Image (cartoon, helix red, strand yellow):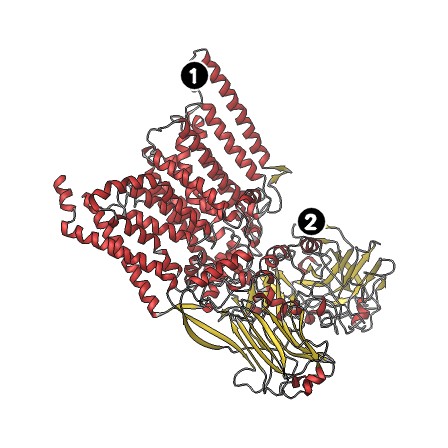
Amino acid sequence: MTEIMQRRRPSDRKVAIAKIVAVAAGAIGVLLAILAPFLPVSYTKAQLQWPQPGSSSLANVAAPNVSYVPVSMDISVPCALADDLPAAGGVLLSTVPDNGAEASTVGLFIRATADRLLVTQRNAVLLNVPRAAAAQATDCRIVIDADTSGTRGAVEGFVPEDGDRASFDLADPNARPQIIGVYTDLPADASTDGLSFTSTVDTRFSTSPTLLKGVILIVGVVMTIASMAALAVLDSRDGHRFRLGLPARWWRPTLLDGTITAVLVGWLFVGGNTADDGYQVTVGRVAPDAGYLDNYYRYFGAPQDPFGWHYRYLALWMEVSTATPWLRLLPLLFALAGWFLISRFALPRLGRAVRTSRAAFWAAGLGFLAVWLPFNNGLRVEPALSVGILLTSVLVERAIATGRFFPLTLGVVAAWATLTIHPAGAIAILPLLAALRPLLRSLRRRRARDGLLPLVMPVLASGLAVMFLIFADQALATILEGVEVQGIVGPTNEWWTEAMRYYILLNPTPDGSIARRVGIFVTFLAAIIIVLTLLSKRRVPGVATAPLWRLLAVAGGAVAVLAFVPTKATHQMGAFACLTGVLAAAATVFLRPEVMRRRCNRTFIAAAAAYALAVAFAGRNQWWYVGSYGIPWADDTPNVAGIGLFVPILAVAVLLTALGAWQYYRDDRATEHGVPPAPPTSPSLIRRMPTYSLAIISAAVLLFNFVSFTKAYQTQRDSWSWTSSNLNAMQGEPCALADAVVVEADPNEGLLSPARVAGQSDPSPGAALAGAGSGSMAGFDPNGVSVHLESQAEADTTSSGLDRTQTDPSDAQSEPSGTAGSADTGGGTTATRGVNGSSVRLPFGLDQSRVPVLGTYGTPTGRGNLTSDWYQLPQRSDDTPLVTMSVAGTIEYVDELAVTHPGQQLRLEFGRVEPDGRVTTVASMVPLDIGNDPEWRNLRFPRDQAPPRASVVRIVADDASGNPAQWLAVTPPRVTPLVTLNSLVGSEDPVLLDWEVAFAFPCQRPATVINGVWETPQWRITPDAEGERVNSRRWMAGDYGGPLGIVENELRPVVLPSYLRNGWAKDWGSLQRLTPLKPQVDAELVLTEETHGGLWTPGPMRAIRN
């Protein structure tokens, strides 16, 4: 054996060379890694010039800056151009449309009034001179210069008088205006002599490595690898062959392997989505055009760097396809890798007792799945974090077991690579810290043989190798600026608010769902069992306690690390998944009667597991967004016949507690009297049941999850579910929810005409709605609609201060009532009169000249009743399954759960026309609705629930309440041909996909970012009302650098009536058609390439609220 080992040892010459290479190559790798942040990068400089180069006419141009404000801006406007505006005045030049929701608050305006020339910026008047005198001054011009040091301006060539303000100087970099484009009221053929606008777009993040940097990075990586390889040569001096440490027959799949794989593959198709899947998808999809990992939904375009390389492989993955099964294949691969590490490396390392226990392996698999399925089925970072943490631990343990340092270098690389995915990746550093003592012992032992530097330098090089990844195409200054912006914008919850995470876990929300609770409870319960056992027994036969203590240190440290993560969402607990598997296995071994001898202790552990399961089932079976479609008990605690499922579980827990107490006192009493404990009389399986406690509750929740999603698939078989969507994707239909949502492309085309029946003689639209022919009306008025429509949930959000006000009173002259940048369902008035004399602002693109409206709001008595004339129904067809009606106010309706909600009565009566022209009423239908009163919305009346011979319908409404808050407003019924959202929006039009919905619409193209400018979207897709209010508006708001700050000031949204096919009462979300507030064309930017060092910065970004 000694001779064999001697032959395996490298020669002295090879050892000498290896030492030199380890030190020299490692030193070069360290030096180049430290140099990487400072190396020069190529920077794309983008400038917006207006009038556009090569154009002789003036036109509004759009170039929405993702950073909101420019790096620099220079403006020159001749005063004489004021003569080209109407006498009442107008805008000479502005950086946002003047009728934007917050135009005056965010933009710069050079405008003429009837007698003054004014320059205003962010609601402050900066210049103010007489219009006539300035226009007559030959050399008069308004000049403005802004950069990261402040904004300056003056009226040159003009002698100011008393009271005039002809110059200003704001030494504040945050005074720069938001730039959406350049807008003017000047005629297209106005003179462009002396007129100029030039702004430099902030493209500091759109960088690429120079040739020099690329070469240096490659050399650095090669040197690091060479140093690590040399260290492997030095490791081989022990005479042993290099082994991975895999157990015998590791390559043979077991029944457990097959079960885990089957569950994971099945979950790929049936499982729900996670919270941020849409966020991850959009960032990955826009990255190739943006040239960097633009955060897109927040942070003024700053990337996630240095915690962002997760998006890099996501972007590459999505270049193949955006179909959901393909995207979910990525977390599946991570899951399989995690289970391989658990079963082939982590568990065997814990000793013979764990390695040979089938119960331990099954507990590991089930515990792993209990965390993985609810947390890690999506595209968030936790799957990678979980695998990276365990991989680091496995490699460090291998280094300790073998006394070799090459596995340690791999572990260091894995740890730092995991850290750069997300701040929670700092958990991966913990295995290195926990193993310091044995590693230092190995270093002292090896130092005498190999020297210090040949061992240390490769480890340092491997630790710094992550710098090549972080700074591959970014520079130090830009990353620091991005980090500062994220810190300013937030959220940045302090460590002492960590209890919020566990409060959320116990809340009845998707973040505190049944499935999420059980996995975390298993993690903590397993850790408690292990700690208590190890404290009471210093040694456990067959268990390697040292690796187990280190694993506990990692698990405990992970909880501490999460406290310092700035956000407190429960989804970050998905990083525990692989650790949970290993902990559950060790805890199961410790629960064996051979280890935990006192039966009362085992019973108490079983009771604790039952209590945990009861607490979990006291929650709701909720999943994020569309993941809850068809899920039983998504809105309530699981119950049967009104009895919560947690009740019998709790009863079992109490009984187990009582049994454990009885066992405790009985065994103690027997011991006190010197009577040996009676031999167990219960069968072996029952006696060992507590051993399987963790596996049982994990299996219970897994079974519950699969039954829930199977039930959802069955319930939604005619509508939409993730299971049916993923199966369709496998058959070539990958567009998911876009193929299940149907839309009224033009609701005006679906207006029903008055029927030709007895008592009705071709009435006008207004007369037909008022029942002038065969109906009647009292207490309804064409203007009986509240000017301001806001649901109670909306009012609560606004008053809480969590949602900024979107209406700027200074823009009232542009819009009679209602906000330009907000959806059209919130009420308002128009300056024109409609077909029945109404000035009510109609929603959903309804044409005021064709669509009448009647309401009871503000009428003298507050009461009213209405029976309209009969309307003719068209023939039934597959694309006309609904009669719909736009309404406002509080109306009785039936929701998606068949629950009737109170309100004023509105019915749609169906009639049959007799041979003599008279109409016989054959049915009266209560509407389906999504709620959200009193805002404008669309009532649904499924035609398949109407009598087959019914050919006419009419509205019957009754407002019997005198309460001013109880009113209703109606428009005529419609039967509009419905088209799928996918066919209407298509895959080419740019779309603003709110972060919550993007994953469910893989075929729609997100409006991209190119050279720091956001592509103007033509559509917006939002989640349900609560999701839009709570998630979209809070996270995507302009105050935080989100796209809504651009949309609200550039575009006018019109909500199109849309419905979930065969889930008519489900609030799936909304589709908005976006049209520019002003006629505009996309600007052409002037691009140049510049090279700058790693410390260069164009100046501070503006990252404060408006």
Label 2: which secondary element:
loop
Q: What residue do we see at 56% from left, 28% from top?
A: 654
State the residue in front, 749 or 135. 135
Neighbour class for label 2 at 10 Å: few (<14), some, many (≥20)? Answer: few
Neighbour class for label 1 at 10 Å: few (<14), some, many (≥20)? Answer: few
Quadrant where the C terminus is found in the figure: bottom right
Q: Which residue is mark 2?
A: 899
Label 1: which secondary element:
loop
Q: What residue do we see at 13% from left, 39% from top?
A: 2
Query: Is residue 1030 among what the camera can see?
Result: yes
- Asked if 498 appears above or below 417 in the picture, the reply is above
Q: What residue do we see at 49% from left, 63% from top?
A: 294
* Figure disc tally: 2
Q: Position of residue 357 (x, y in %)?
A: 35, 34
Query: Is residue 253 among what the camera can see?
Result: no
Q: Amino acid at mark 1?
A: Pro
Q: Amino acid at mark 2?
A: Val
Q: Is residue 248 left or right of residue 277?
A: left
Q: Is residue 1015 left or right of residue 903?
A: left
State the residue in front, 777 or 996. 996
Q: Farthest residue toward the right? A: 860
Quadrant where the N terminus is found in the figure: top left
Q: Position of residue 908 (x, y in %)?
A: 75, 60
Q: Position of residue 521 (x, y in %)?
A: 50, 38
N-term-proximal mark, 1 vs 2: 1
Residue 484's mark?
none
